[in-house]
Image (spheres, grey):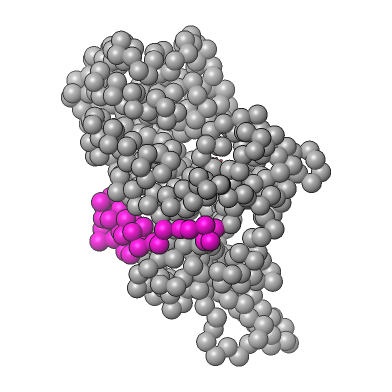
Amino acid sequence: NEKDSTVVVVLGASGDLAFKKTYPALFGLYKNSFLPPNISIVGYARSSIELADFRKRVSSRIKATDQEKSLLEEFLAKCTYVSGKYDDAESFKQLNTAVDKIQSTTLGRKHRVFYMALPPSVFIPASQGLKQHVYAHDGNNRLIVEKPFGKDSESSRELATRLAENWKEDEIYRIDHYLGKEMVKNLMILRFANVFFGAIWNRQYIHNVQITFKEPIGTEGRGGYFDEFGIIRDIMQNHLLQILTIVAMEKPVTLDAEDVRNEKVKVLRAIKPLTASDVLLAQYGRSKDGKEEGYLDDKGVPKDSVTPTYAAAAFYIKNERWDGVPFILKCGKALDQQKTEIRIQFQDVPGNIYPSVMRNELVVRVQPEEAVYMKFANKQPGLSSTAVTSELDLSYARRYKDVKIPDAYESLILDVLNGDKANFVRDDELEAAWKIFTPLLHEIEGKGGAIKPEIYAFGQRAPDGLDAFVAKHGFRRDASY
Ligand code: BG6
């Protein structure tokens, strides 16, 4: 409604996530006219910062072309800042006064979105303070929360219970930013809008699935946070497991958020909980040329830490579609490159008569250089009759030249503003995800002595043990791969 107003409150506004992701995403939406009319953005954090300085910091992280400069000025004019504590009623009352003032002239309804870009330690008090003192009584309230959602089943349940004391599930938007990525959003269309993929998407035709996340950077000053969580919680339990779920789920009855998430939960419940024998754990050391520091050199990391910065794990889904098909999830920091991809490797051709052919593969490259490509056998052109592996290649940079792929956060914040929850994590989904990982995490961090990770050099393609690990789970490496 044109007469309504919306205030987005960014809590943790002086923190890294807010400057790096939240504000640039809000600007991205603003400049493309995707923000609702009468919108204001209120930053809230502990540090007392002058408004002009705050706006300067926001704009320093936003890339704007010369033509966009005036739009950026308009956007910044909508951004204000309130400083206050996360566990103090008075502070939240002041925040409410500021928000009320902004919405005082609104003729329609007054909506509020609360974006909690906050460390877990202040999560609960902040959510309470917001509910008690800043909640909109004439409009929608939406609470955006970011991981970590606990550290295992028990802590996650505790967090969920405390959050539920003040917020209805319906109002909570749990972000997994991978669900906002273009190619992750493409997965359901690939699967459910193409008759040929639909037909072969099962254990009869698919041999194994590999989902890979690689990053060429180390912990970069986040060692303190990272050491408490490790790569399994940082990447695998959320981002990669979400991708697995979409690759494996049944077709939802409709695209409605509850229908989609019902199917996702079913997949998660059919996955066997992991044990240490299903995983490969590794930690990065100094680079071979000595220039990049090892994980243990990070100041926030204890010298004897055994926290993995790399993990590979094989998942098995016990249902009719997937029984026996390994889903191999791999993720690591401080590797040779940035790459996230999904690689579906098909079964061997039955009764094959061409000795040189490789297995078919369908690859969805999530980032960088978004692409969908299929490896298939083709006759070597010319007089030879040899079958060679070739590619049907849909590279986005070539095919969709003029389209700018939006940042995941833009897409997700837009969903929140529209009240679409399909790309957010539901409470029972989170619980099912933790169930898969909790026995493993307790085992590897166990009282009986934590499991020591293998060491790899910063910048390596993968830990030495990886090739044997994936081969053990049935992946066959194509010579051209
Ligand atoms: C975050 C992790 O969730 O995802 C980071 O906490 C990681 O450790 C990041 O670097 C990767 O996201 P992206 O979008 O850069 O692939």
Q: Along the line of sight, which residue is nearer the eye, 31 or 89?
A: 89
Question: The magenta stretch spans which residues?
Answer: 250-279
Residue 252 forms part of the magenta stretch: yes
**Quadrant of the rendering where the C terminus is positioned:** bottom right
Q: Residue at x 80, y 40 (%)?
A: 290
Q: Quadrant of residue 203?
A: bottom left
Q: Along the line of sight, which residue is nearer the eye, 420 or 341?
A: 341
**Quadrant of the rendering where the N terminus is positioned:** top left
User: Compared with residue 235, is residue 200 higher up or lower down, i.e. above or below?
Assistant: below
Looking at this rendering, what residue extends furthest in the right direction? Answer: 289
Q: How many marks?
A: 0
Q: Is residue 467 left or right of residue 362?
A: right
Q: Along the line of sight, which residue is nearer the eye, 218 or 449?
A: 449
Decide if residue 171 is in sight here.
no
Q: Quadrant of residue 255?
A: bottom left
User: Compared with residue 174, is residue 88 higher up or lower down, i.e. above or below?
Assistant: above
Q: Is residue 237 left or right of residue 289?
A: left
User: Compared with residue 96, is residue 323 higher up or lower down, i.e. above or below?
Assistant: below
Q: Along the line of sight, which residue is nearer the eye, 229 or 184?
A: 229
Q: Position of residue 187 (x, y in %)?
A: 43, 58
Looking at this rendering, what residue extends furthest in the front direction? Answer: 448
User: Compared with residue 306, is residue 385 higher up or lower down, i.e. above or below?
Assistant: below
Q: Residue at x 50, y 45 (%)?
A: 447
Q: Position of residue 423 (x, y in %)?
A: 36, 47
Decide if residue 350 is in sight here.
yes
Q: Position of residue 92 (x, y in %)?
A: 31, 15
Q: Position of residue 230 (x, y in %)?
A: 54, 42
Q: Residue at x 53, y 30 (%)?
A: 20
Q: Residue at x 52, y 27 (%)?
A: 16
Residue 73 forms part of the magenta stretch: no
Q: Quadrant of residue 2?
A: top left
